[in-house]
Amino acid sequence: MNADRLAVLGGTPAVTSPAPRWPDFDERDRRALIDVLESGVWGGYHEAVGELEGRLAAAHEARYGIATSNGTVSLEIALTAAGVGPGDEVIVPPVSFVASATAIARIGAVPVFADVEPETITLDPARATAALTPRTRAIMLVHFAGCPADLDRFVPLCTEHNLALIEDCAHAPGASWRGRPVGSFGAFGSFSFQASKNLTAGEGGMLVTNDPDLAESARSIMNQGRRSGGAWYEHVRLGTNARLTGFQGALLLVQLDRLPGQNRKRADAADRLRSALRDLTGFTPHPPVGDPRVTGHAWHIFSMRYDASAYQNVPRERAIDALATEGVPVSAGYPHPLYRNPLFADHPHRVEPCPVAEAYCREAIWLPHHALLGTPRWIDGVVGAFRKVSVGIGALREVRSAREGT
């Protein structure tokens, strides 16, 4: 039957409607933007920015929020405020967006890449411990794909060695560890509101912290070196302009209202997919089983390992092409670990052995978070597409072999 034939070979796609749009918006977002427009206060001093700082901090059990222009500069500010400087070493996982590492390099510190755990793809505590030297000053802990890293081990590790723990929560708004939201465990939690993120205003960022001195330092750096309560032209430290605008703040307040419900939908869809993929040995989700300490996974990415050996060694790229043609919005994710980017040829860094990260970048398949906002029926269509490709993937090898033989 045509429905059983792979769409890439001329069959009918399993998924016939697109994934939910992202960003999601409605009349509330329009009204929020118009309110700022009509207020005449468009910049970073609009009341919506302060309200957002308070609400996002409270949602992550932090006392202070510092809004920033993006999630890249927020990491640079966090490191600087925590006392990391030129020549200091900061341990960072090699599976993340490049900003997790370039923030370190841009303040003159040295990124030290340590491997990730195979199940969560977050920084491996044992590999991080092995990478410590007398020059280590901080750990950049990335809650990759929305899954909290092992905070039971990283918090005491940083305490023991007097290291600043910077939580990169760009993928993880609303995620939690043992019932406590991420971002509140270290010196700072850093969030991104870039267009692809679960909480977005197109661009923007936020730092949260429970330390009043760190909060004051970060706010001062963000706001041209001013101090709270100081004169407009009084600048007490070297800072920059990293303010979030009123438009972004107002938009994010509306988006923040939606986040808990969206995260519940993502979690339900992820559970549905994980259950279905247990029968397909070639597609293994990350993490493959639930960790009870992870009490909230933000599912920014539904990440899977593709095992080509389970499918007659059909390359990952052909499996991705087959799934995409079935209507599933999948991608290959990061093409290589961060340290393989050419930019690091010009910046001091150190690379510990990272075989897990290397394998992950060769084998990963990603489904974006907004796809998990689809209806249960739409998610069932995605499951059907995976099953269809799993059964028919051998035909891809036959077609390829025939083409290569001509």
Image: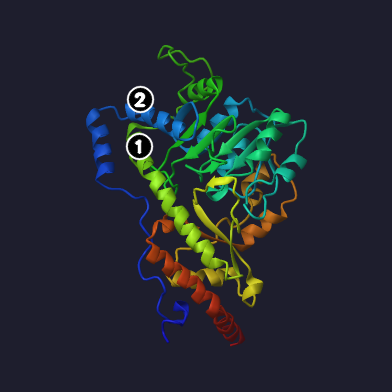
Q: Amino acid at mark 1?
A: Leu
What kind of element bears circle 2?
loop
Q: Which residue is mark 1?
A: 253
Q: Quadrant of residue 214?
A: top right
Q: Is 293 or 60 nearer to us in this picture?
A: 293
Of mark 1 and mark 2, the one earlier in the sequence is: 2
**Residue 89 is at least partly visible in this image:** no
Q: Quadrant of residue 89?
A: top right
Distance from Cα at disc 1 to Cα at disc 2: 15 Å
Q: Amino acid at mark 2?
A: Tyr
Q: Is 90 or 53 nearer to us in this picture?
A: 53
Point out the residue furthest to the left here: 38
Mark 1 neighbour class, 10 Å CA radius: few under 14, some 14 to 19, many 20 or more = many
Q: Which residue is mark 2?
A: 45
Residue at image location 47% in from the left, 72% down from the top: 385
Residue 383 horizontal side relative to residue 157, left or right:
left
Residue 215, label in figure: none
Residue 148 horizontal side relative to residue 201, left or right:
right
Q: Position of residue 107 (x, y in %)?
A: 61, 31
Residue at image location 50% in from the left, 29% down from the top: 62
| Nearer to us: label 1 or label 2 | 1
What kind of element bears circle 1?
helix
Mark 2 neighbour class, 10 Å CA radius: few under 14, some 14 to 19, many 20 or more = some
Q: Position of residue 34 (x, y in %)?
A: 24, 37
Up-down relation of residue 231 to residue 210 (above or below): above
Q: Position of residue 325 (x, y in %)?
A: 44, 72
Q: Is 113 or 387 nearer to us in this picture?
A: 387
**Residue 178 is at least partly visible in this image:** yes
Total residue callouts: 2
